[in-house]
Image: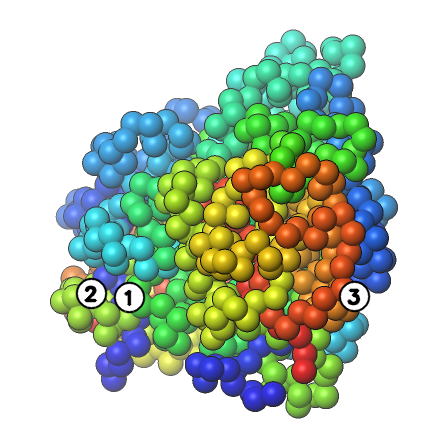
């Protein structure tokens, strides 16, 4: 039953390898010829990444000075945040934005690869390596790079560029950070601790330091660069993708006062953790689905499965028991850590508004005929964190 | 005391605290040093300082840690302060804390010793590039670095170790992070989601690159001799903050929850205020509006008038800009009383513990109220005529404090103000 403190998604800003608009995403996901991924296999061999589509930055970050103060991950996020505000019809509404709350899920920013390479090359030969490190960092680091790297400065840039200043919080912690950002946004709305929240994150996968990090964990996929589920036959692994996704989540009362059209109703969000001993994540997910009172009739699953074998295969078995059509968004967008759950929610909300699920992304995914009632959105982090949400018609 | 506040929300109380700063480990040692005007700022011995303009910091060097790195030490400090706080609160059972973990944590990335270890494994000779690092990583042996330098691994370890409930939150709002973590805990209790919350701020960021990054922003004091004189909040010759390490943990509970289990209430968290600043990445709006609104929001949230505030625990970093803007804010909010409300900066002694500061200084604010003793602002030798504050110069002073506020303002425009009162 509709309640004035229901959390509605009234704005979506999504940018990825599939494009910079919701229409571009919907079209790519419903290609009559079947889905074909956008992959860059040339830049970071032996790995592939889903590269960010071309963004006309001036449209959302009009001051070139602001663009220069950011690294790519911040530009992607600030751009997507602007799209979400446009989508919700609140861009430039100074008074509303000054009361709007913001929760950003963020990692950190790009390093200066030339500076790092110079230090790594010279350090072993330096007469006094410690002093060499100090002198090179003092001499070579750009002062503004720090601000382009700090986790909370994506939110800072959104405050500066778009004027969202009601409150500003940044959550860190890979996939779980995005899920907890949404959970807390919805909980605040339900409790009357806020009326309208901008929540999102961004990820630049086209970074050697990121690939290094996940290669240290031996978690990256090598060719063939197939879908999340088919990949499980041959060792699994992650293909990362550059993604920015922000949502405007708003109370039903607030949305109706300003006659905003909602994409979907966030009927519930749950997050938890475990040590990932066998079956623990499944137990968490089952408890979440029960608590969410998910109605499987006419429903589908949008999964955030990362491709990493143990959690992906455990989730696959858990989902198989539900017997519903499933889409793994990382096959289409690549895996994007912090914003991955948000992007899944964005695509789920878009599907709910269209009244149908988008097409299969690989052979293992069944087509879905008939109208879409609810979407269960899951996110099991590549290492930790299990989250689930249910989206329904607004 | 009623279980609900002026807005009908559950009253949130503090029932346990734990703290580590450059002054030492535990509430007792810290409070003694803090009220005697002792400085924890010292010459950096952890790494070579040749070629650096700033060679001092409030490091925590007295806590051993295996496989040292920023996150490893931050995690160890958090573990120790949680142990102290949970013991004082006598809450839950070992490994079973009845509420969520809300952790203020600095951003995490691979550090130089680890990056150099991967480079060494690559066997590259003349020039080492990221291609070489990635190739070396692919040969295996660096799995522990992946986990250690995830943004989520410190919070996950602590959640597992102390058995907190649900998904732990790791938050960063720069120098306001500790305040943000407390605010997240207060809000969760007010929503009725939980009867208790474990709130922690921890920071162990004194390494060459982080020090140099702050130095390149001209944020740090370069007054290296003697180290203990470098942090000079509100003084005319202040010239920057001093980086420091530390951690603070607070057990928060609804009053009803605390009373039901017979817990001793240490203080009441009456209100939180928050406003972001969209002016600039490192500077406050020149009109001080966000800082003013932040303090006013906190007072409104607490249901108090400015006249009821007896003490301000300043953000007080000792940078020319911060202290000036904090005074602009305080004088706007408190009007004629601004110059006579005591406002002291713990950072004059412990340095700026960055992510941990909001939690550490909230704890010191509670101790200030409990003990009826205002910690001083040390190194206050030359008053700044532009900042006519009563900063409790150099010597602690007895005072009855009913309601206090604690300010935290961060790079990136994130501001948090807390209102705290004593237990009745």
Can the viewer see residue B109? no
Residue count near mark 3 (Cα–Cα under 10 Å), binned few <14, some 14–19, many ≥20: many
**Residue B227 higher or lower than A141, as above or below:** below
Are dots 3 and 2 in contact, CB under 8 Å? no
Q: Quadrant of residue A168?
A: bottom left
Residue A162 lies, in percent from the top left, at: 29, 45
Q: Mark 1 — on which chain does it sit?
A: A
> Are discs 1 and 2 located on one and the same chain?
yes
The numbered mark, 1 or 2, whose residue comes first in the sequence reads 1
Residue count near mark 2 (Cα–Cα under 10 Å), binned few <14, some 14–19, many ≥20: many
- Which residue is labeled 1 in the image? A250
- Could you say which disc has been placed on residue A262 in the image? 2
Q: Nearer the viewer, residue B298 or A123?
A: B298
Residue at 70 percent of width and 53 percent of height? B392
The nearer-to-camera label among 3 and 2 is 3
Residue at 53 percent of width and 76 percent of height? B189
- Which residue is labeled 3 in the image? B84
As measured in the structure, the alpha-carbon distance from the residue carrying label 1 to the one carrying label 2 is: 9 Å
Q: Is mark 3 on a helix, strand or loop?
A: helix
Residue B325 lies, in percent from the top left, at: 49, 44
**Residue B40 higher or lower than B5, as above or below:** above
Quadrant that contains the C terminus of chain A: bottom left
């Amino acid at each position: 039953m509709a309640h004035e403190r229901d959390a509605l998604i009234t704005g979506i800003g999504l940018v990825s390898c599939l494009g910079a608009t919701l229409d571009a995403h919907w079209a790519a996901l419903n290609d009559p010829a079947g889905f074909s991924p956008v992959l860059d296999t040339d830049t970071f061999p032996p790995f592939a990444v889903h590269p960010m589509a071309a963004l006309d930055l001036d449209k959302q970050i009009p001051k070139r000075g602001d663009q220069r103060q950011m690294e790519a991950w911040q530009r992607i996020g600030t751009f997507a945040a602007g799209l979400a505000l446009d989508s919700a019809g609140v861009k430039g509404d100074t008074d509303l934005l000054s009361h709007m709350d913001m929760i950003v899920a963020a990692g950190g920013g790009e390093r200066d690869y030339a500076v790092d390479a110079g230090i790594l090359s010279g350090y072993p030969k330096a007469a006094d390596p410690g002093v060499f490190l100090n002198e090179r960092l003092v001499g070579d680091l750009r002062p503004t790079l720090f601000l382009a790297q700090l986790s909370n400065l994506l939110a800072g840039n959104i405050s500066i560029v778009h004027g969202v200043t009601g409150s500003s919080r940044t959550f860190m912690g890979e996939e779980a950070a995005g899920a907890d950002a949404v959970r807390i946004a919805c909980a605040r709305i339900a409790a009357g601790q806020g009326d309208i929240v901008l929540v999102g994150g961004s990820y630049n996968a086209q970074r050697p330091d990121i690939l290094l990090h996940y290669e240290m964990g031996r978690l990256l996929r090598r060719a063939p660069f197939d879908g999340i589920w088919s990949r499980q036959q041959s060792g699994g692994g992650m293909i990362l993708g550059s993604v920015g996704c922000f949502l405007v989540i708003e109370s039903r009362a607030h949305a109706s006062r300003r006659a905003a059209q909602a994409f979907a109703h966030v009927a519930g969000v749950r997050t938890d953790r475990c040590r990932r001993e066998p079956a623990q994540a499944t137990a968490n997910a089952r408890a979440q689905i029960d608590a969410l009172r998910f109605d499987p009739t006419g429903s589908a699953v949008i999964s955030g499965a990362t491709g990493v074998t143990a959690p992906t295969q455990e989730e696959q078995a858990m989902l198989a028991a539900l017997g519903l059509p499933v889409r793994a968004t990382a096959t289409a967008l690549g895996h994007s850590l912090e914003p991955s759950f948000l992007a899944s929610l964005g695509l789920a909300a878009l599907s709910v508004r269209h009244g149908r699920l988008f097409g299969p992304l690989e052979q293992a995914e069944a087509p879905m005929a008939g109208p879409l009632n609810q979407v269960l959105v899951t996110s099991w982090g590549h290492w930790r964190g299990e989250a689930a949400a249910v989206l329904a018609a607004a | 005391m009623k279980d609900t506040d002026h807005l009908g929300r559950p009253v949130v109380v503090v029932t346990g605290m734990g703290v580590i700063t450059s002054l030492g480990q535990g509430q007792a040692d810290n409070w003694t040093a803090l009220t005697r005007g002792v400085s924890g700022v010292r010459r950096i011995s952890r790494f070579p300082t040749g070629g650096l303009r700033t060679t001092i910091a409030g490091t925590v060097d007295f806590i051993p840690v295996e496989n040292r790195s920023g996150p490893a030490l931050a995690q160890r400090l958090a573990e120790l302060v949680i142990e102290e706080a949970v013991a004082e609160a006598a809450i839950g059972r070992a490994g079973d804390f009845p509420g969520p973990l809300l952790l203020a944590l600095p951003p995490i990335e691979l550090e130089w010793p680890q990056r150099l270890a991967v480079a060494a494994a690559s066997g590259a000779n003349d020039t080492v590039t990221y291609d070489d690092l990635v190739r070396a990583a692919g040969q295996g042996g660096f799995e522990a670095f992946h986990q250690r330098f995830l943004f989520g691994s410190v919070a996950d370890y602590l959640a597992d170790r102390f058995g907190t409930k649900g998904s732990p939150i790791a938050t960063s709002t720069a120098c306001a992070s500790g305040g943000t973590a407390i605010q997240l805990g207060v809000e969760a209790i007010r929503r009725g989601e939980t009867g208790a919350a474990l709130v922690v701020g921890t920071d162990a960021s004194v390494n060459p690159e982080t020090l140099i990054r702050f130095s390149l922003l001209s944020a740090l004091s370069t007054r290296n001799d003697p180290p203990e004189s470098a942090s000079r909040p509100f003084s005319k010759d202040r010239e920057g903050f001093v980086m420091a390490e530390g951690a603070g943990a607070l057990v928060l509970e609804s009053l009803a929850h605390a009373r039901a289990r017979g817990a001793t209430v240490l203080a009441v968290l009456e209100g939180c205020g928050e406003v972001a600043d969209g002016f600039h990445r490192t500077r406050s709006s020149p009109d001080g509006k966000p800082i003013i609104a932040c303090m006013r929001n906190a007072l409104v949230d607490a249901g108090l008038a400015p006249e009821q505030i007896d003490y301000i625990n300043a953000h007080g970093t000792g940078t020319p800009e911060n202290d000036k803007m904090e005074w602009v804010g305080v004088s706007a909010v408190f009007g004629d009383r601004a110059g006579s409300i005591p406002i002291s900066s713990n950072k004059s002694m412990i340095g700026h513990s960055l992510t941990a500061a909001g939690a550490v200084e909230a704890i010191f604010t509670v101790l200030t109220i409990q003990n009826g003793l205002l910690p001083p602002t040390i190194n206050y030798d030359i008053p700044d005529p532009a900042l006519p504050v009563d900063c409790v110069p150099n010597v602690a002073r007895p005072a009855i404090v009913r309601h206090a506020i604690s300010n935290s303002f961060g790079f990136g425009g994130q501001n948090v103000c807390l209102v705290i009162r004593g237990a009745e």
